[in-house]
Amino acid sequence: MHKVKVGVIGCGKISSIYMENCHKFEVLELIACADLDPARAREQAARYDIPRAYSTDELLADPDVELVINLTIPAVHAEISLRALEAGKHVYVEKPLTISREDGRRVLEAAAAKGLLVGCAPETFMGAGIQTALKLLEDGVIGQPVAATAFMMSGGHETWHPDPEFYYAAGGGPMFDMGPYYLTALVQLLGPIRRVSGMTGKAFDERTITSEKKYGQKIQVDIPTHVAGLLEFEDGAIGTMITSFDIFGGSSLPRMEIYGTQGTMLVPDPNTFGGPVMFRRNGDKEWTEQPLLPGYDQNTRGIGPADMAYAINSGRPHRASGELAYHVLEAMWAFHDSAEQGTFYEMQSTCTRPSALPQDLAPYTLDA
């Protein structure tokens, strides 16, 4: 088996779990990392036994690097992904794919022109929780899905994040920060989206940082912080979704539920890999907790690049694909466009529903 050689660009907080898990998957070989801050790149290289600590230019020029994991901030996702593709490297990017739909199309077109693969987080739908929910749906346990709900209710990041400013700038907000987890899980479970309606708002024009690093500093809020709407899926199911940074007293709403013709299923938090998964069929008096399928129930960020690496080797489709990420990106913008225009947004893209993970494989392998 060919080990695909990986370089990580962006050595911030999220990079640690990727680096840790890259070492676990048999198909990946993590050989380089880079960051705008050279000291941070060296620090992560030493911590995770990465042979080469680079600048971005040096990493992209290294002919040994076959796959770039792009963990930069959303504002430069497109720039770094396009540069990596131009350098002849496959790209896996942290969510969202890009900030704009135009840049998203440019990335996919550049990859197609070069014969390269693009993948994108979130990969949490490959965790045991969502995979178990998918198996229940495929087995018809709750009948034909007719509706779904998805709620991400939060008070915002300024209370805990050391650098929360970009969450309130273009490309931020609750939909672009957390929407990818919920929308990707919904597409995995229910298929692609046909049309969207939305309403948006914001509680404050300015927020005060109360986390320690920048305590007392003010943030201008440039984007909606409460996004609500409806999704119609191509198979006819209807979804209700809210993502919000304007929930200040907590919420008791479930993360996700799927409603079928024969019952209801509780889906776990799509920002996690585990459970629980529960269902109750028509006539049942109690909920049944479904044991999770064997697989990845802990934080396994890095499974997306690993799945891509198998695809690079074999030519099969990869699950956390650029096509899926672009469909989710378009849906996120659809909520905002619908709110501004007062009309339904008809989706222009579609995608292939990712296949379920195979069972009974050794840990940290994805293909037989």
Image (cartoon, grey):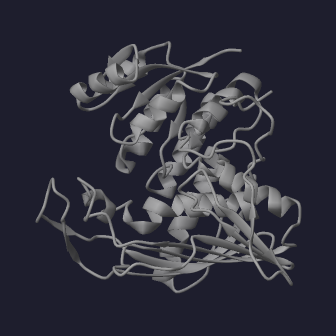
Q: Is residue 221 visible?
A: yes
Work out whether 248 lies above or below 159.
below
Left or right: residue 130 compared with residue 282: left
Q: Nearer the viewer, residue 216 or 219?
A: 216
Q: Position of residue 242 (x, y in %)?
A: 52, 76
Residue beneath the point at 53% across and 42% down: 107
- Residue extending farthest to the front is 286
Residue beneath the point at 24% across and 25% down: 38
Work out whether 19 lies above or below 3.
below
Q: Nearer the viewer, residue 261 or 70?
A: 261
Work out whether 229 lies above or below 321.
below
Residue beneath the point at 21% across and 69% down: 220
Q: Nearer the viewer, residue 110 or 21?
A: 21
> How many numbered circles are shown?
0
Image quadrant where one finds the C terminus: top right
Q: Nearer the viewer, residue 120 or 363?
A: 363
- Residue extending farthest to the bottom is 342
Left or right: residue 113 compared with residue 179: right
Q: Position of residue 287 (x, y in %)?
A: 74, 74
Query: Which image quadrant for residue 263?
Result: bottom right
Left or right: residue 102 compared with residue 131: left
Left or right: residue 160 compared with residue 333: left
Query: Which image quadrant for residue 334?
Result: bottom right
Q: Is residue 191 visible?
A: no
Query: Which image quadrant for residue 130?
Result: bottom right
- Residue extending farthest to the left is 216
Q: Position of residue 182 (x, y in %)?
A: 58, 63
